[in-house]
Amino acid sequence: MSDKIEIPDLMICAMASEIENFDTVLHGVSSPLPILAMSVARKTHAPDMAYISGAEGVDPEIDRVYPSSFDGRLNRNSVAYFGLHEAFDLAQRGEINVMFLGAAQVDRFGNTNLSVIGDIDRPKVRLPGGAASAFMMPLTPKVVIWVTRHNKRVLVEEVDFVTGQGYNHRAEEYKKNEIVVVSNLGVMNFRNPERLMQIQSYHPGHTIDEIRDNTGFDITPAPGVTETPVPGAEIINLIHNMDPDNVRWTEFH
Amino acid sequence: MSDKIEIPDLMICAMASEIENFDTVLHGVSSPLPILAMSVARKTHAPDMAYISGAEGVDPEIDRVYPSSFDGRLNRNSVAYFGLHEAFDLAQRGEINVMFLGAAQVDRFGNTNLSVIGDIDRPKVRLPGGAASAFMMPLTPKVVIWVTRHNKRVLVEEVDFVTGQGYNHRAEEYKKNEIVVVSNLGVMNFRNPERLMQIQSYHPGHTIDEIRDNTGFDITPAPGVTETPVPGAEIINLIHNMDPDNVRWTEFH
Amino acid sequence: MKKVLTSLEEAANLVKDGDLVTFGGATFHRAPMEFVRELARKGKKGLTLVDREPAMDFDLLIGAGCVAKVRTAMLAFEIFGMAPNFRKKSESGEIITKEGACQPIISGFRAAAMGLPSLPIKGMLGSDLMEISEVVGSQKEVEDPFTGEKMIAVRAIEPDVAVIHAQKADEYGNVQIQGPLYEDVIKAKAAKKVVVTVEELIPNSEVRRMPQATSIPHFIVDAVVELPRGAYPCSCFNYYDVDYDHIKEYLKAAAEGQFDKYLDKYVYGRENA
Amino acid sequence: MKKVLTSLEEAANLVKDGDLVTFGGATFHRAPMEFVRELARKGKKGLTLVDREPAMDFDLLIGAGCVAKVRTAMLAFEIFGMAPNFRKKSESGEIITKEGACQPIISGFRAAAMGLPSLPIKGMLGSDLMEISEVVGSQKEVEDPFTGEKMIAVRAIEPDVAVIHAQKADEYGNVQIQGPLYEDVIKAKAAKKVVVTVEELIPNSEVRRMPQATSIPHFIVDAVVELPRGAYPCSCFNYYDVDYDHIKEYLKAAAEGQFDKYLDKYVYGRENA
């Protein structure tokens, strides 16, 4: 089984499992994986979650994903429209429970970089920008960061530029909020007193050692580390039916 | 003619004449006279004014007035809804040109009192409150205050409590904004260097001396003081058709 | 989405003695009058009521002895003049009235809705109302951090409960308001708990047919009560107009010292006036 | 109401060299692309562009040499990756890019829409983006005047011109936007001048039939241009979807150093791509 399951599908289900029932969840731009993860969660263990789309629909009936995560067609049969500025008001009230964010670099403290490789004023590589990261990272009870290329250039000792705030770059009141990193090799969390990245689970077909060898800093397994649970066939079918054009694969090429 | 024209109709037309074409105008609560004045202005010299109703309609087709100025029926065939908080944003941008406000007391500097007669903590008479006065008075290029009982208890030397800010209670930048008082005896403005109340016009059937005798402070006629222009029969008919129940008379009883 | 449909009785239990409460609508329109009467029947005590321009809803609760403090920009019965119980009890000192103004109260709700401790506004300076506000701690003169411009910081107003009467909602709390919204959406976002009474309960499928008609989404609503004519004698746009005869009867009773009789007849007597 | 219907040519003249400009929509949706192409044809210079998450609209103007500065929270082509001209010219230093974040940019627009010099927000602290912002003067760490809580004051963003592509408007500038609004209404309120290009011109009588459908009222709109397919190759909800083949052609041309040929074909060549 584990040799058959595809990494995007496994990541989508790992991301979905970070959502609890009754959570209010928001996704942003360029987010086919989060959209599929939120859809899977709704159809499985979190039927009562509130789904706020980056395209502004509330609890839309998502029949498929598109190359754009702001496409108005993602709002089909929504119960309401809720603008991003309204969602941010909600976040400032602490009422958005889970947010999914991307990253070009993540370090051991959970800092993310989406801004620049090299110096900000003389960038070696100009990155697209952090979008909501610097705002949502500290405020949100749980931020799930997805990484499609787990290697030493992405999982780094220290990010070139702190776009999103890890535990060493946030006020005391925000240190209680969780960060979870879901990569193509495993799932990492920071549930330890030092708030340092540790291995929560390794994906089927991968190992703790493989994760350690591909991480740019010393990372240890969390107590009770396990293999990432494998989704059932019906969930895999759900994902495939929602993504006939394999949009979810784009980030992996 | 002047003995036939009724005071509410005359006041409504005097209030309407303070609106210029292309002005953006807002009315508030308990405002049958402003609603009729805005309607008259639109049908006469200010066809292009923007009419923002306290009931949230923009440029509604007003067929009649009601005992409440927030009645949803006042929005018939509006071109848009515009909430009071949005209108206040506009006011903070300086883009509401004219606002109509009531007053229980007005003094020589243009201060208004809608809060209390006597001491605020041990009120002799508790008044209803200033509504938008303290916010709109300084910010608005032209505030028109209507007074249905011009006497020495209403037009006072100094108000018991400054609800709305006259010229001696506002910052320099706001002293350029105009205040006009339309009463049952005449029209008063502050277009002089001292920014003191002066008589702009006296209503037909009334005199400058009558106004002075019924004002609680020394008030002088403005240069070029005249009789308040008398509206034509078609405008009177317009008003009467819009107010079959004589709601406009209520404040005069 | 979770179902939040409940009874008037249960919903009223969400309001505790001493709570800070606001109501939807303005003056005679979409005030949640039947919920207000239920609060009076339950004998709630020591409520602090806050709103921009309320009318009979506040005055009835003041007359019924449920209120300790009131904060409004104006509390009157439109062209019919003063709110009788408000006037009587504020002059006698039975209730504390710290008058506000429209913009500070609206902006206080907006600050809470935005999750901010305060929000800057303009105007107000020079009014004696500023002094009251500084004492109460609801407003403060500040300087803009960039321009140095004199501004007024308005402290957030986060009601314990906001009660709104709307035309339609589904059992999950997706609410459709027709006609003027007043500050109802802002109040719902600002409050800790939100109760919505509605003329009609509609199926979720109808909500999904026109999401743009939803004014308040389910995830900020704690209770929905089906309550036809729940705003009476105030109006509910597209359903019924204000019953001004009833309002005149209310004012007459209060003027003649017969307000208790009014309460017996319309509040403590029949379940629905 | 005054009539503000005009031509694309006239409307584009409202944008001056060096202006601060924002566009409606987000990424590939309701960007005013035909207006953008007209700005390129007119050879506008030194524009500062600001928006939360733009895409091809900003990148095309950068590629056409119209832009001096860019402020965005993210400028990319969604899952297709980096915006090619933005990346090239920001790395070469040809344009100045001071990156923001979504909330500060949205709140900057909101502050201007509210007539305020600045607005407080949360978050941001600890990010290196704060340092940039403090230097640029767009954000500042402050303390709430009541609670002492650490907040970030965001300076108002008041664009010289906001250009929005919508589905419908009348000749007076009453605008109906269908589907996601993004920050279009806020931008319109925030800007000094507002240009709206629309798929369809509708009579005022149709606007009055459903006032609740009006997203932007006439009194804040300075120009309306009838421009079917004005968002192409971006989408216009209920009218047409994104033309991803065109977007891939754009990216391919840029990747192969053939961007000038793209401009000749789709911008300087035929009036409408």
Image: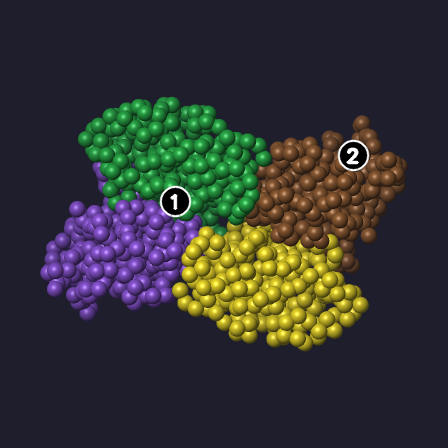
Chain colours: A brown, B purple, C green, D yellow
What's the residue type where badge 1 is placed?
A: Asn
Say whether residue B155 is left or right of residue C132.
Answer: left
Q: Residue at x 52, y 55 (%)?
A: D186
Q: Position of residue C171 (x, y in %)?
A: 52, 34
Disc 2 element: loop
Whole-angstrom CA distance, mark 2 to mark 1, is: 51 Å
Q: Of C110 and C230, which appears nearest the observer? A: C230
Q: Quadrant of residue A165?
A: top right
Nearer the observer, B229 or A78: A78
Residue for badge 2: A232
| Closer to the camera in the image, C80 or C52 | C80
Choose top left, top right, bottom left or bottom right for residue D250: bottom right
| Visible residue check, residue B6 | yes
Does residue C22 appear anywhere in the picture? no
Question: In the image, is residue D68 above or below residue C110?
Answer: below
Disc 1 packing (10 Å; few <14; some 14–19; many ≥20): few
- Picture coordinates of residue D132, whole percent (x, y): 65, 55
Residue type indicated by callout 2:
Gly
Q: Residue at x 73, y 62 (%)?
A: D245
Which one is nearer the viewer's eye here, B62 or D47?
A: B62
Position of residue B41 measured from the top left corner of the image (x, y, whole percent): 29, 63
* Chain assignment, label 1: C
Mark 2 chain: A
Q: Quadrant of residue D235?
A: bottom right
Q: Quadrant of the N terminus of chain B?
A: bottom left
- Identify the residue position indicated by label 1 in the image: C238
* Residue at 11% over, 57% down: B210
| Label 1 secondary element | loop
